[in-house]
Amino acid sequence: ISYNAKIGDLASGFQADHAEPGVTIRRKDNLENGGLNTLACVGNTATVSSGDAKGARGYVTGKHGGVEHVLIWFDQDTLEKLGPDDTIQIKSWGTGLAIDEMPDIQCKNLDPDLLAKMNLHIRSGVLEVPVAATVPAQLMGSGMGSATAHRGDYDIMTADIQAYSKYGLDKLRLGDIVLLQDCDTTFGRGYLEGAATIGVIVHSDCLLAGHGPGVTTLLTCKTPKIRGIQDSKANIGSYLGILREGN
């Protein structure tokens, strides 16, 4: 339970490594945890089902690969009542989601209600998506080559501080929507010229080589049919109505 790392906070500058906002959950059994991490989608509702916070509702905000965590936002009052052994039930919805008008684009880890709130537009056969930043493929690191993007994330590398700042990535916030250029996450994660992936920033930065803020895939296409539209307010916190005052 992270009491003071929130959706909308800067993803850089924490005196921490891969800081996860809100509540981190996982199943003890690896197979069960695999199901949780695959089926939970960003924007899904999560309900506390035991303990002092029973009945409180929140939202899935991302997935953290490697450690195989699902990340959830709850309000501050709920965070204060939660305990490590409390159980949380996620209403999984979104696996298999598709956009009928854009058959070349795959949706992953995305709740249909959140999709409807993302201010998407189709113009001349291209899906326009508001994004807080555009990330070039050469800055993508840990998680590249993974077998699937239906779970987990992969990191924007921070080792080259000048390049990181050049693209405005030092201003990224937890929950921001970003465009990954020439990144194909259709069947795993890899480089493909002309491809595009839309993702959400799920955890904070890191100084280890190959690591940095993590991105969970929401939309991906092998061809140039996704266009990012710069919008500093493109954050799931805005769409879900969960940003705290000042963010």
Image: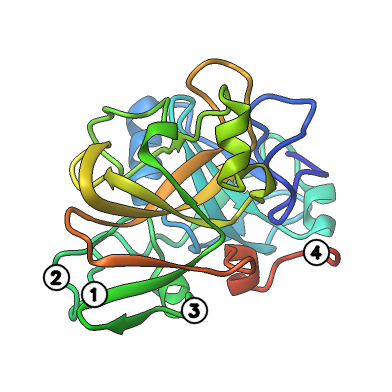
Q: Residues within 10 Å of mark 3 (few under 14, many from 20)?
A: few
Q: Residue furthest top?
A: 209
Mark 2 or mark 4, which is nearer to you? 2
The amino acid type, in three-letter code, at marker 2 is Pro
Residue 160 is situated, as x and y percent measured from the top left of the image, at 56, 25
The amino acid type, in three-letter code, at marker 1 is Ile
Of the image marks 3 and 1, the number of the one nearer the N terminus: 1
The amino acid type, in three-letter code, at marker 4 is Arg
Residue 71 seen in the figure:
yes
Of the image marks 2 and 3, the number of the one nearer the N terminus: 2
- Is the C-beta separation of discs 3 and 1 under 8 Å? no
Which residue corresponds to mark 1?
A: 99
Residue 146 is situated, as x and y percent measured from the top left of the image, at 28, 29
The amino acid type, in three-letter code, at marker 3 is Lys
Question: Residues under labels 2 and 4: Cα distance?
Answer: 36 Å
Vertical arrangement, residue 173 with respect to residue 242, above or below: above
* Count of numbered circles in the view: 4
Of the image marks 4 and 3, the number of the one nearer the N terminus: 3
**Which residue is painted at 36% across and 39% down in the image?**
137
Q: Quadrant of the C terminus?
A: bottom right
Question: Residues under labels 1 and 2: Cα distance?
Answer: 6 Å
